[in-house]
Image (cartoon, helix red, strand yellow):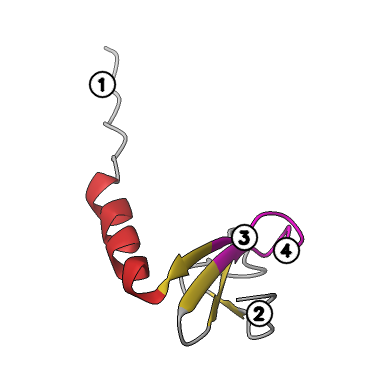
Amino acid sequence: MGTPDNWRKSSYSGPGDGDSCVEIATAPTRIAIRDSKAPARATLTFPTASFTPFIQALKDTHVTRPTQPTRP
């Protein structure tokens, strides 16, 4: 894929300055994601057909923190 030049911010990156920003770049056969706060660091690259199952697996394994019991 080389270095993509079409990076765009995820719509799930949060309000304001997007301090939880993830960027995505697409190509005909690959999709790449990176942390916008550290764009020179590691980039995850997936074959296009693998990206949706990857995201679904993240959703399926998302663990919600249980609420803490209140103390009397």
Mark earlier in primary sequence (1, 2) = 2
Q: How far apart are marks 1 and 2 (CA)?
A: 47 Å
Q: Main secondary structure of the magenta part?
A: loop
Q: Tell me the residue that label 4 is attached to.
A: 39
In the image, is residue 51 above or below residue 60?
below
The answer to which quarter of the image holds residue 38 is bottom right
- How would you rate the neighbour count of disc 1 (Cα within 10 Å): few for under 14, some for 14-19, many for 20 or more? few
Q: Tell me the residue that label 2 is attached to.
A: 4
Secondary structure state at the residue bearing disc 2: loop
Could you say which disc has been placed on residue 69 in the image? 1
Q: Residue at x 26, y 60 (%)?
A: 56
Give the extent of the magenta segment. 33-44
The answer to which quarter of the image holds residue 72 is top left
Could you tell whether 54 is left or right of 44 in the image?
left
Q: Tell me the residue that label 3 is attached to.
A: 43
Instruction: Indicate the amino acid at tag 2.
Output: Pro
State which mark lies toward you, 1 or 4. 4
Instruction: Indicate the amino acid at tag 3.
Output: Thr
